[in-house]
Image (spheres, rainbow, N blue to C red):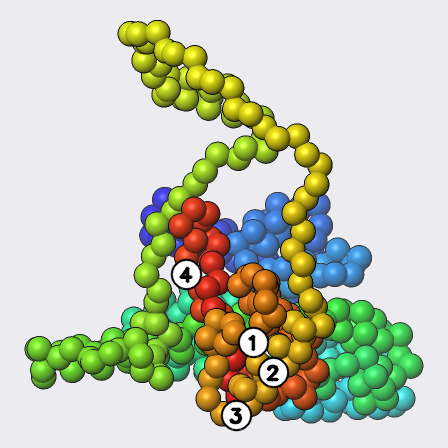
Amino acid sequence: MSATDDLERFFFALHRHRALLIEAHLRNNGFVHETADNEKAVADLIKRGVCWRMDDESGRARLSQAFTEILNVARRDELRRYVNVDMGERLNDIEDLVASYRKAKRYASSEEQDLTYRRIEEQVYGLREALSTTSRHLWKEIESEFAYVSTLELKLQENQRVLEKVKRLNDNLGMLDYQTLSSERFAGEDPRLRKLFSASLLQQISNIREELVDAIYRLDAMLFTFRTQRRQGRIVHAFSIKYQREPGFNPSNYAGQTQIPPVLNQLEPLRPGGHADLDSDKDEMRLTRLIQNLRKHTEKTSPTEESARIKVAETTENKAEDIDFDALNLAVQTFYLRAADGEPVHAMSRFDLAPQGCPAHIWLFAVAARHNLMSPEELGVFSMKYIDDTDSVFNGLRKVSDIQVSLR
């Protein structure tokens, strides 16, 4: 269905229900009283957005604010045309109407009271609809991510503009709290005004404020994303200009610079690797089929000679290393005193300090153990460094061959 068909059906519905619309606008202050005869017509107008149903149980519908403004333009009635003003002026107008309503209750007839109340009701429901329309329009811009502009700078500008507008509207709605609307300035003790302000308007304002808070969070996140994209774009643009001016430009020791843009500070990718989970039996059959033919057994061509049995000496005695630990501790203390002279000292270069019969690995372990048992004051004086190499048999292990001790 094309847009032309939609508009033709819309104008056809307006023409078909023109009598109902004219009566509601001119004689009923924008209200449409639903009856059994016009039930389908009212439902059709509500479906097309021309009317909306009231929250109360009076069985009434009301012309939308946008359609009412169109009718006022057609009548050239500037006094009834609604001008989009700020929240403060809206509240002042409603407050003045409330004061007139109270005077009408005191001095005027019931007909004038109802007329004044309908004017207040019209302003309140107009305010409700204006807030809903503004919220829908703002969210439409947010959901589209400002697709009506193409450049990043314009998106940033639109984002900032909408964010300020949302914050300003949220601050203005803060003036319409329960205490304000239930005070003598507005509802007071009048039952009709309390129902109009406290029940109808206050609930709508609460819903709108929740939507505005969500919109603020969404706009802040979008603003951060746009600024990040702009910063990255400027870096790329600067590199592009640099290479255009100097085609052979090559930064020297780029990775060693202190300030590297995060977008360019990338690591080399690691090659993914994997291994079988030996602790799991779910792949046991699959792995068995993979390795069952890996080992090839060679046929024996000649009989092998039986080797003589190896004689094993049966003994339960273990050879113990006889080390004088007091002498070893004294030697380690002497070693650290030599390191305190100022020059770095290697443990194996001073292996002569170790007691006689002490293995080299015990000497290295004693030097390392003494450093690990130092107090915080001693650790602030001595620094220890392992001199090691990769183990040739086991992956991930390192073999210590010497220890260097120096002053910090």
Using the image, determine if residue 89 lies above or below residue 296: below
Where is residue 334 shown, x and y percent of the image?
60, 83
In this view, the residue in front, 366 or 72, is 366
Q: Earlier in the sequence, mark 4 or mark 2?
A: 2
**125 left or right, relative to 348:** right
Query: What kind of residue is marked 1?
Result: Leu
Say whether marks 1 and 3 touch (CB < 8 Å): no
Q: Residue at 20% x, 80% y: name it.
A: 252
Q: CA distance from mark 2 to mark 3?
A: 11 Å
* Residue bearing mark 2: 334
Say whether marks 2 and 3 touch (CB < 8 Å): no
Q: Earlier in the sequence, mark 4 or mark 3?
A: 3
Q: Which mark is residue 389?
A: 4
Quick check: can you spot residue 19?
Answer: no
Q: Which mark is residue 341?
A: 3
Query: What kind of residue is marked 2?
Result: Thr
Q: CA distance from mark 1 to mark 4?
A: 25 Å
Say whether marks 1 and 2 touch (CB < 8 Å): yes
Query: What kind of residue is marked 4?
Result: Asp
Q: CA distance from mark 4 to mark 2?
A: 27 Å
In this view, the residue in front, 405 or 250, is 405
Q: Nearer the viewer, mark 4 or mark 3?
A: 3
Q: CA distance from mark 4 to mark 3?
A: 28 Å
In this view, the residue in front, 29 or 237, is 237
Q: Secondary structure at mark 3?
A: loop
Q: Earlier in the sequence, mark 1 or mark 2?
A: 2
* Residue bearing mark 1: 353
Q: Quadrant of the N terminus?
A: top left
